[in-house]
Image (spheres, helix red, strand yellow):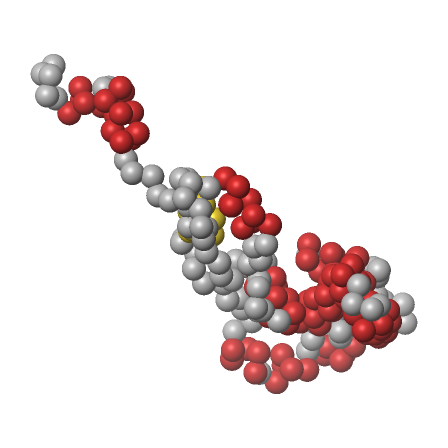
Amino acid sequence: MKLDSKYFDKIRTRRKRAEEQAKPVATCQWDGCDKPGVHRAPVGRNAEGQFFLFCFEHVKEYNKGYNYFSGLSDTEIARYQKEAITGHRPTWTVGVNRDAKNAPLHSTLRSGSAAGHARVKDPFGFVNQGGGRARAEPQRKLKTLEAKAFDTLGLTGAATAQDIKSRYKELVKKHHPDANGGDRGSEERFRAVVQAYQLLKQSGFC
């Protein structure tokens, strides 16, 4: 192997380390600080992949006050959380195209509906049981954020739309900052209740 081979250069660890140490180190971007900025901190929303460079002390200070959702309303945050479930990708109804959805049969024949059962031939009585009454539909399986929203409101997944609305009004009245003298803990609870209700509303529970 020649001394100037590219393979030989790769194993010159001492030389490589010396070159890395010789690279200029950026200065901390915190105002008035001249320490080396070796720690990265995200710039914020809509600036993904961009970072500030701070020293150790100032990157800790920056992270304490960092809020990715700063400037967004509760409704916008709830929408972001809902879209995050699918990775912010568009979704479509499974198994139903536009022409079939607009057809008269689709509008009158709904899965599990009494009107639909009347139009289905059921010689063995699988659909209509117990004197012609339709079977009860299974309870909808909750997603992680939906289950968390129900828990925030102190309800279960079996709660009706009226139960959700009543509980929401009760908690809003209880934790509103004006009713608690601007208490910080009450304000956080109030925000969590609003976000939970908005998520359940957008998911069709109320």
Closer to the camera, 181 or 81?
181
| Whole-percent x, y for residue 121 in the image | 72, 73
| Whole-percent x, y for residue 112 in the image | 75, 70
| Whole-percent x, y for residue 103 in the image | 57, 83
Position of 159 compared to 37: left or right? right
Q: In this rendering, does residue 178 appear at all?
A: yes
Residue at the limit of the structure toward the top, as seen here: 1
Q: For the C terminus, which image quadrant?
A: bottom right
What number of labels is visible? 0
The residue that appears at 89% across and 67% down in the rendered structure is: 130
The residue that appears at 37% across and 44% down in the rendered structure is: 27
| Whole-percent x, y for residue 116 in the image | 73, 77
Closer to the camera, 162 or 26?
26
The residue that appears at 68% across and 57% down in the rendered structure is: 145
The residue that appears at 65% across and 82% down in the rendered structure is: 107
Could you say which quadrant of the image residue 173 lies in? Answer: bottom right
Position of 87 compared to 5: left or right? right
Closer to the camera, 91 or 45?
45
Closer to the camera, 13 or 75?
13
**As displayed, is residue 155 above or below residue 52?**
below
Could you say which quadrant of the image residue 80 lies in? Answer: bottom right
Position of 85 compared to 44: left or right? right
